[in-house]
Amino acid sequence: MSPNQTKPRSIDEYIAGFPADVQEILETIRMTIKKAAPAAEETIKYQMPTFTLKGNLVYFSAFKNHIGFYPPVTGYEKLKKELSRYEGPKGSLKFPLDEPIPYGLISKIVEFRVKENLIKAEGSQKKN
């Protein structure tokens, strides 16, 4: 979020607070997530665009030099090598703005997170 940007109430407001080139990237990330998780709902949490489906699914945020992508992705061995290139602090991912954004990777992460959340939700329903 840029310093002179007010707290966004929607993803549209969040994206509107950035320069046009970054808006385009953020909107493409948003569409990539929607395509990979059509049942997910959009919201703002921690002042970041957030998608939820049976719990928090993914968050993303723009910074001066990169796009941050959260939460940490663990247990996805097939993607471990691909993810390692973008590892940031505490397991987050950093996609540099001066490189092509890996939209295919984002899609794979979201699909994996959907499966994780649905399995967790099913497990907690069985306990009740």
Image: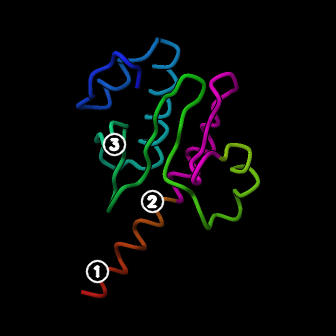
- Asked which secondary structure carries label 2, the reply is helix
Q: How far from the left and from the top, in percent, is residue 40? A: 34, 50
Q: CA distance from mark 3 to mark 1?
A: 27 Å
Instruction: Indicate whether 109 appears above or below 75.
Output: above
Residue drawn at the location 43% of the way across and 34% of the way down: 30
Residue 53 part of the magenta segment: no
Residue occupied by mark 3: 46
Badge 2 crowding class, 10 Å Cα cut-off, few under 14, some 14 to 19, many 20 or more, is many
Badge 1 crowding class, 10 Å Cα cut-off, few under 14, some 14 to 19, many 20 or more, is few
Q: CA distance from mark 3 to mark 2?
A: 20 Å
Range of magenta residues: 88-112
Query: N-terminal of the two: label 3 or label 2?
Result: 3
Circle 2: residue type: Val
Residue occupied by mark 1: 125
Quadrant for the N terminus, please: top left
Residue occupied by mark 2: 114
Asked whether the beta carbons under mark 3 and mark 2 sit within 8 Å of each other, the answer is: no
Residue drawn at the location 60% of the way across and 48% of the way down: 89
